[in-house]
Amino acid sequence: MLRRGSKSKKAAKASKPAKKPKAAKAKASKKPAKAKGSVFVQKAKSDVYTVLLAVSLVAILIACLFLFLEMGRYEYDFKGNNARAAAYSSELLG
């Protein structure tokens, strides 16, 4: 007689995990032990988009260099006082 919550003999046999063959156990024991909590991920390979990203970085750095060289020609005058004075004097003359 079976009680509630108890399993039949067939159900008990089906719930047990299947045994691994001896060859599989031997292969499993040859693997190196991993540290707990660590994940080993293979490094991604570079593709066309990575190269384009590097090219754009170099282009931006070169543009910044030319910007500083151009600013050096104007002695790093950001306010444009000389341009305002020139425009004002041309209004007076003309």
Image: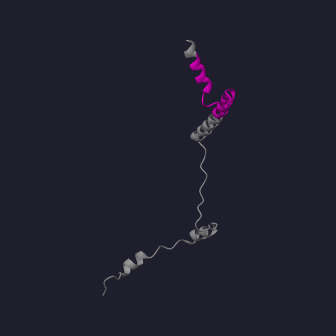
Measuring from the top left, give residue 41's x and y in whole percent.
Answer: 59, 56
Measuring from the top left, give residue 40's x and y in whole percent.
Answer: 60, 59
Q: How is the image coloured?
A: one colour
- Image point 41% across, 75% down: which residue? 14
Residue found farthest to the top: 94
Q: Is residue 7 left or right of residue 19?
A: left
Residue found farthest to the front: 92
Q: Is residue 72 magenta?
A: yes
- Image point 57% across, 68% down: which residue? 24
Query: What range is drawn magenta here?
Result: 62-89
Where residue 33 sits, quadrant-wise, is bottom right
Quarter of the image that includes the N terminus: bottom left
Q: Does residue 36 lie above or below 87 as drawn?
A: below
- Image point 69% across, 26% down: which residue? 73
- Which is nearer the eye, 68 or 20? 68
- Which is nearer the eye, 81 or 16? 81
Measuring from the top left, give residue 47's x and y in whole percent.
Answer: 59, 42
- Image point 59% across, 64% down: which residue? 38
